[in-house]
């Protein structure tokens, strides 16, 4: 009977230990990152995952969702961090709602821009000129996922400029697919756009002037984390705080992911090896090799 009880206790303890291994929190070796289907977020998040797995010994779980559920998940503690928060304008509403439940780990990319873009051959240079050229674009602006801050700002621009246009929701990939199709046919198109993005290095595009400054000035991209991450995983918080890329670095990573055809994590892993000196600058001291 004692042996049976001892065996039963051992099984319970083992089951508890295994359950604890998958939890986010103190003592966990799994990092959970959320991202949105945007080029820069895919690139940075997969790069961070590759580095944390290869250099820091963590298992990283990546979950893609629209921006609203990602913010909700980080604020509730179910996701450890989100590396694509545009501040102070684009994601202002989410920070107002969840800011007291998040830790801002700082800027990972600066001089980010939002707006509307057209191919350079299109004879329109300003948002103010869109109504006069409505037939050129069939009265449509090609958008991304409906929860994105860029979509909210674009709706505001439609109102402020009195544009007789319909904003079509979709996703980052469907927007770039429509853009490529139009460019291949040398046809006009206007899309919601942001920098950094690989489309600006692949095609000759121009951001439309925004005299009313509805889309705002340049912004910074921040990493936001759940409350308590710095206490539970100080090395992860330090790494995410140190993580920062410039336009050339992020542009080359996005191009590699888009053009390689392989899994983003595999491409990011190779990019990290090719840019080892930069990666070493991000690592917490105890993780440096």
Image: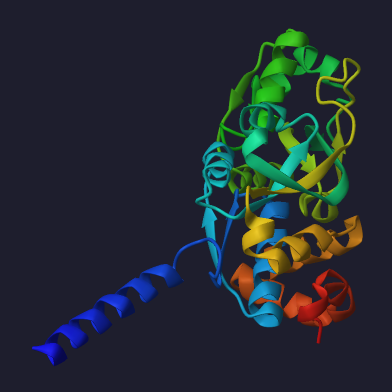
In-image side of 266 versus 13 (left or right): right
In-image side of 39 versus 128 (left or right): left
Instruction: Give the residue at the far left of this rendering.
Output: 1
- Residue 202 in sight from this viewpoint: yes
Residue 270: image location, x then y, percent: 73, 80
- Is the C terminus in the top left, top right, bottom left or bottom right quadrant? bottom right
Instruction: Give the residue at the far top of this rendering.
Output: 162
For image coordinates 32% across by 80% down, the residue present is 14
- Is the N terminus in the top left, top right, bottom left or bottom right quadrant? bottom left
For image coordinates 45% across by 72% down, the residue present is 21
Give the colouring mode of the picture.
Answer: rainbow
For image coordinates 31% across by 77% down, the residue present is 13
Residue 87: image location, x then y, percent: 79, 36
In the rendered image, the vertical position of residue 179 relative to residue 88, given as above or below? below
Instruction: Give the residue at the far bottom of this rendering.
Output: 3
Residue 239: image location, x then y, percent: 76, 66
Residue 144: image location, x then y, percent: 61, 37
**Residue 161 versus residue 202: which sits nearer the camera?**
161
In-image side of 208 versus 72 (left or right): right
In the rendered image, the vertical position of residue 155 relative to residue 7, given as above or below? above
In the rendered image, the vertical position of residue 13 relative to residue 148, given as above or below? below
The quadrant holding residue 175 is top right
Number of callouts in the render? 0
For image coordinates 73% across by 53% down, the residue present is 40
- Residue 189 in sight from this viewpoint: no
């Amino acid at each position: 009977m004692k042996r049976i009880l001892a065996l039963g206790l051992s099984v319970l303890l083992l089951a508890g230990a295994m359950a604890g291994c998958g939890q986010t929190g103190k003592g966990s070796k799994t990092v959970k990152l959320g991202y949105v289907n945007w080029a820069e977020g895919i690139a940075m998040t997969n790069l961070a995952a590759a580095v944390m797995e290869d250099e820091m010994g963590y298992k990283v779980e990546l979950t893609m969702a629209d921006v609203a559920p990602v913010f909700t998940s980080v604020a509730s503690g179910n996701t450890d961090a989100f590396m694509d928060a545009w501040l102070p304008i684009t994601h202002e509403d989410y920070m107002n709602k969840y800011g007291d439940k998040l830790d801002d780990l700082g800027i990972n990319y600066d001089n980010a821009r939002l707006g509307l873009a057209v191919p350079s051959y299109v004879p329109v240079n300003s948002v103010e000129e869109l109504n006069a050229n409505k037939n050129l674009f069939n009265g449509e602006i090609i958008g991304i996922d409906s929860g994105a801050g860029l979509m909210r700002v674009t709706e505001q621009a439609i109102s402020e400029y009195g544009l007789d246009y319909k904003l079509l929701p979709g996703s980052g990939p469907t927007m770039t697919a429509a853009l490529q199709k139009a460019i291949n046919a040398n046809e006009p198109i206007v899309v919601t756009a942001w920098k950094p993005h690989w489309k600006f290095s692949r095609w000759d595009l121009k951001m439309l002037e925004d005299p009313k400054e509805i889309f705002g000035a340049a912004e910074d991209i921040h990493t936001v984390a759940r409350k308590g991450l710095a206490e539970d995983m100080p090395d992860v918080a330090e790494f995410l705080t140190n993580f920062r890329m410039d336009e050339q670095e992020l542009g080359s990573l996005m191009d590699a992911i888009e053009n390689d055809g392989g899994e983003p994590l595999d491409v990011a892993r190779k990019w990290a090896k090719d840019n080892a000196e930069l990666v070493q600058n991000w690592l917490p001291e105890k993780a440096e090799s």
